[in-house]
Amino acid sequence: QVARNTDIDYQTFLNALHVPEDAGEYEQDLRNMLARIPDGWGRWIGCGKGWYPIIIKADKRIAELFPNYEIHQVKEKYGTLRYYWGTGRDPWQQANPEPARPDWNGDDSDESWQAYIEACRKNDEAHEIWRKTAAGKTYLEEAERRCKLAEKIEREAEEESACTCEICGEPGRSTG
């Protein structure tokens, strides 16, 4: 009689980092990418080794725009790459330090400035002042600009996959 293990915790399995066996020199970069996948999504990369350089490049470029971005899926579909992502929580953390100090009636000490920042976060009118960047754009406008750039990076990776062999990474062509 064969014993069956019914104590497998599905959530633990789903949330573990499933590093591809053929990761090789790309292992650490793939681990970093897998760590970006939120709990419950399943931490797998669903494409061949030939596309690892493409997805790693896309990951690093999007991370420059949104350091805390999340990957939802990376997979092959209909012969090309699909790279699904979201900005994640606190998209500005690390990427944008606090904005330049606007004109305000406070002293110039760091404690006073931190108190002002906290007050701004709690008060919508003051928060609008806090959200202004040195260039005069709100963080919302900056987020939109960065999203468009990240979507362009995603499209470029998907287009590059269409002419790259998923298995070996050599230039390829459509057979259709």
Image: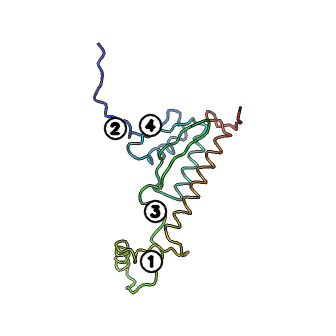
**Amino acid under disc 2:** Thr
Q: Which of pointers 3 and 4 lies earlier in the amino acid sequence?
A: 4
**Amino acid under disc 3:** Gln
Q: Nearer the viewer, residue 56 or 10?
A: 10
Q: Whole-Å distance between the Cαs marked 2 and 1? A: 44 Å
Q: Is residue 126 left or right of residue 133?
A: left
Q: Which of pointers 4 and 2 lies earlier in the amino acid sequence?
A: 2
Across and down, in percent, residue 154 comes to: 58, 50
Q: Whole-Å distance between the Cαs marked 4 and 2? A: 11 Å
Across and down, in percent, residue 165 comes to: 65, 35
Q: Which mark is residue 94?
A: 3
**Amino acid under disc 4:** His
Per the image, label 2 sits on a secondary structure element best described as: helix
Q: Which mark is residue 12?
A: 2
Residue on which the image places disc 4: 18
Q: Whole-Å distance between the Cαs marked 3 and 4? A: 27 Å
Q: Residue at x 31, y 34 (%)?
A: 9
Q: Which of pointers 2 and 1 lies earlier in the amino acid sequence?
A: 2
Q: Residues within 10 Å of mark 3 (few under 14, many from 20)?
A: few
Across and down, in percent, residue 140 comes to: 49, 66
Residue on which the image places disc 1: 129
**Amino acid under disc 1:** Ile
Across and down, in percent, residue 35 comes to: 43, 46
